[in-house]
Amino acid sequence: MVGCGSTSCCHSGLLVRHPAHPTQCSHPLASVHTFWQVPVLTPSDWCLAMAQLLRAATWGLFPSRSYCSQKAKGELCRDFVEALKAVVGGSHVSTATAVREQHGRDESMHRCQPPDAVVWPQNVEQVSRVAALCYSQGVPIIPFGTGTGLEGGVCAVQGGVCINLTQMDRILALNLEDFSVVVEPGVTRKALNTHLRDSGLWFPVDPGADASLCGMAATAASGTNAVRYGTMRDNVLNLEVVLPDGRLLHTAGPGRHFRKSAAGYNLTGLFVGSEGTLGLITATTLRLHPAPEATVAATCAFPSVQAAVDSTVHILQAAVPVARIEFLDEVMMDACNRYSKLNCSVAPTLFLEFHGSQQALEEQLQRTEEIVQQNGASDFSWAKEAEERSKLWAARHNAWYAALALRPGCKGYATDVCVPISRLPEIVVQTKEDLNASGLTGTIVGHVGDGNFHCVLLVNPDDAEEVGRVKAFAEQLSRRALALHGTCTGEHGIGLGKRQLLQEEVGAVGVETMRQLKAVLDPRGLMNPGKVL
């Protein structure tokens, strides 16, 4: 039976109820009014056939802009806007041009593509109702946090409704004994650590911007501490997700915050890094870490890029438990000196930090100093006081803005490759040579302890020829990383610009598998369309 109208149905053995319409079947195939005979298929053929049927049966039935086909781009039907206001309140809906344009771009060089409306829900129930309303009318949904992404993830390529989640900013639960915390999307990493200041715990994942923690989960963000504490993939225990049709999913079960589980598929891992294409993350349960007993930071300059990156590999191979190890080339050091008022040598430089007991730190520092001196390091200096360390790492976190200041009025484009540690010296040295020969203005900076580094390239977005050269440089670098068994993106995501590179990285079967998952969770293709796939 199809579209049965009962409180449950059994298409393919699945029991599905929709929270907004508990008496209506919401199985993705409920609108397909056909019967067919199923041939004998292998399990893998059956899965592929069902996913292809699902896409064909649903995506074609719901044109992406049918909800306002009679309107110009940038407009929604008046009744639909009023329906949004009825859910979240009139003061929490805007169709103003300036507001829409603010939500149609991030920190990337991708051009602004504004949504048709912006809403600010106050709780998860409102998020669910807005999603269900958009889903029922075929309206695209674009999640929005702090807007600090670097891959065009908030661009509304098909218009639609931008759901700004920043006003949901509560810390819902803090479990000190279990080293976990539950936060809403409006809580940023700095706000969380301020809240934790007197608890003896902290959350170490630290991208350059003061990003939303749920947004960081959505992009699988990383940062300077990842070499010791891992990325968001290692530190998310559970997610509360509103699916495209409004249903509420807890990826590890409601309220659960265990350290490990072998129960079923890893749904949490599926949504971490999904870039808003599978659902809206309305809460995340995070793993916390004990604050270190003592902390020391250090800087050291090197005669060459090769020497600096070689030192990184040697420190890791010596099993020194470094907490942070960051590389900045001489161009970036000059930019940071100017922007953040540092007084460091203008040379290829490593920023390092060590965590532990006083005795352990002395051993780590001694071993590290021996290694870097063997590679010709100079100007080796320690920062033991909190104020000194804060100034140093604030400069590193502001490196993006320091680079932009090298060419005022231009946009930045950041590459994001990551390679196995053993191949890091090779690719960084080659990239530096290519950058010097390219005639482009750019710097190199990176979390080299993970094998991840960035070229920050400055580009005039109105200069088509220069934009083309920047894109060609970035694609060449990404393909070099793939050839060295690395990835095109270590932490920024695929977004709009790396979709072809994703296929080259994971292969046709990998991308098709992702499409099948997307088709099951978002059969109308309404969640952040145009991204990743």
Image (cartoon, rainbow, N blue to C red):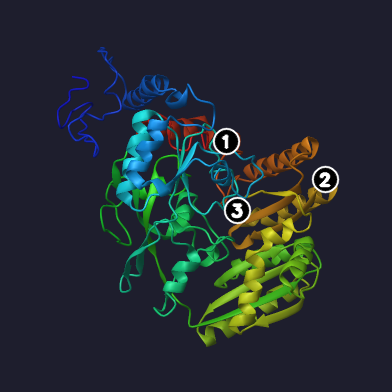
Position of 320 relative to 407 (above/below):
below
Would residue 251 be visible to someone looking at this image?
A: no
- Where residue 133 appears, x then y in whole percent? 34, 35
Q: Within 10 angstroms of label 3, few (less than 14), some, or many (20 or more) residues?
A: some
Name the amino acid type tagged 1: Arg
> Which of 381/16 is in front?
16
Q: Earlier in the sequence, mark 1 or mark 2?
A: 2
Residue at 60% over, 53% down = 420
Q: Please tell me the numbered disc located at residue 520.
A: none
Q: CA distance from mark 3 to mark 2?
A: 25 Å
Q: Please tell me the numbered disc located at residue 499.
A: 1
Residue topped by disc 3: 420
Q: CA distance from mark 3 to mark 1?
A: 22 Å
Name the amino acid type tagged 3: Pro
- Where residue 186 appears, x then y in whole percent? 44, 58
Would residue 69 be visible to someone looking at this image?
A: yes
Residue topped by disc 2: 438
Q: Horizontally, is 417 left or right of 519 in the view?
A: right
Residue at 48% over, 79% down = 292
